[in-house]
Amino acid sequence: MQHFARLFRSSLGKKYIMAVTGVILLLFVIGHLIGNLQIFAHPDVINAYAHFLQNMGAGLWAVRLILLLTVVAHIWAAIALTIENKRARPEIYRQDDTIQATYASRTMRISGFIVLAFLIFHLAHYTVQVVDTDYRDMYTTLEDGTEVHDVHAMMVKGFQSVWISLFYLVGVGLLSWHLRHGFASMFQSIGLRNARIAVPLDKISIGLAVLYFLGNATIPVAVLAGWVA
Ligand code: HEM
């Protein structure tokens, strides 16, 4: 137990926390994207899916709690590591690679905070529905007669606003950028990055980020173009 506590106080322990929480969040955002892409099927598909999730009861709250703790741990470890790095190397950096590493970690922090701001807006928008309270009165009936929240119509109404769509594009764009660097640096943190896999790993992380961005971007773009109504 003491050994465990010591590991988490160390820089290495915090890097492991960043990596593990990063993987959990990555799996969540990919799963969420796959769920959202159902908007391209018949409206009943995504509405039935959202109805199922909303009726998971305690299971839904357990998932929400795990996600919240994961986000908090990810941010805490990032802040703690930044403070430790600054304390360890307060001098002005001269070497180019150090400057580049500092630049990458600074932009990771900035993109991370903007993604957090995006997430808060997103929850207010589609989960708590305070940005447009009309969403709360949108209901529809599935083929089997079940009355459900019309999440399909809510998403269409939301993305018909050019400003909201642009905000989502910027939010998921920065998240994709964050994932691209986070994914590659995770391998470095846990000591799995070496010269042999550095190039393929970089290509995989760029491919993952581009696919993730395009997958998300198709949703507001398709609504604005009138392909989904
Ligand atoms: C184009 C991109 C996205 C779309 C269209 C979208 C859509 C939605 C919708 C419609 C809901 C509410 C579902 C319901 O009413 O049951 C939702 C919830 C949520 N979204 Fe997204 N989302 C997007 C991107 C993201 C991103 C990038 C993140 C994370 C950074 C995220 C995290 C969440 C979370 C945590 C919830 C709340 C789940 C809950 O506890 O009820 N979403 N999203």
Image (spheres, rainbow, N blue to C red):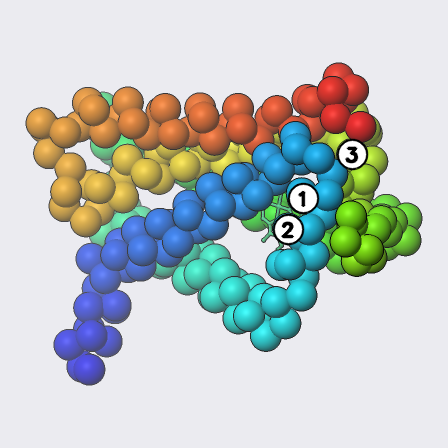
Q: Quadrant of residue 181?
A: top left
* Residue at the image position 85 percent from the left and 49 percent from the top: 140
Front: mark 3 or 2: 2
Cα separation between marks 3 and 2: 16 Å
Front: mark 3 or 1: 1
| Total numbered circles | 3
Which quadrant would the C terminus be assigned to in this image? Answer: top right
Using the rendered image of the protein, determine whether residue 83 is visible from the camera's viewpoint: no
Q: Position of residue 104 (x, y in %)?
A: 35, 32
Badge 2 is on which residue? 49
Asked whether the residues under the numbered discs 1 and 2 touch, taking CB atoms below 8 Å apart as contact, a structural biologist would say yes
Cα separation between marks 3 and 1: 12 Å
Q: Position of residue 183 (x, y in %)?
A: 32, 38
Name the residue nearer the viewer: 115 or 39: 39
Amino acid at pointer 1: Ile
Q: Position of residue 109 (x, y in %)?
A: 45, 42
Badge 3 is on which residue? 156
Q: SS class of the residue under badge 2?
A: helix
Which quadrant would the N terminus be assigned to in this image? Answer: bottom left
Q: Give the residue furthest to the bottom.
A: 1
Badge 1 is on which residue? 46
Q: SS class of the residue under badge 1?
A: helix
Amino acid at pointer 3: Val
For marks 3 and 2, the one nearer the N-term is: 2
Q: SS class of the residue under badge 3?
A: helix
Using the rendered image of the protein, determine whether residue 53 is visible from the camera's viewpoint: yes
Cα separation between marks 1 and 2: 5 Å
In this image, 114 relative to 219: left or right?
Answer: left
Q: Quadrant of residue 57?
A: bottom right
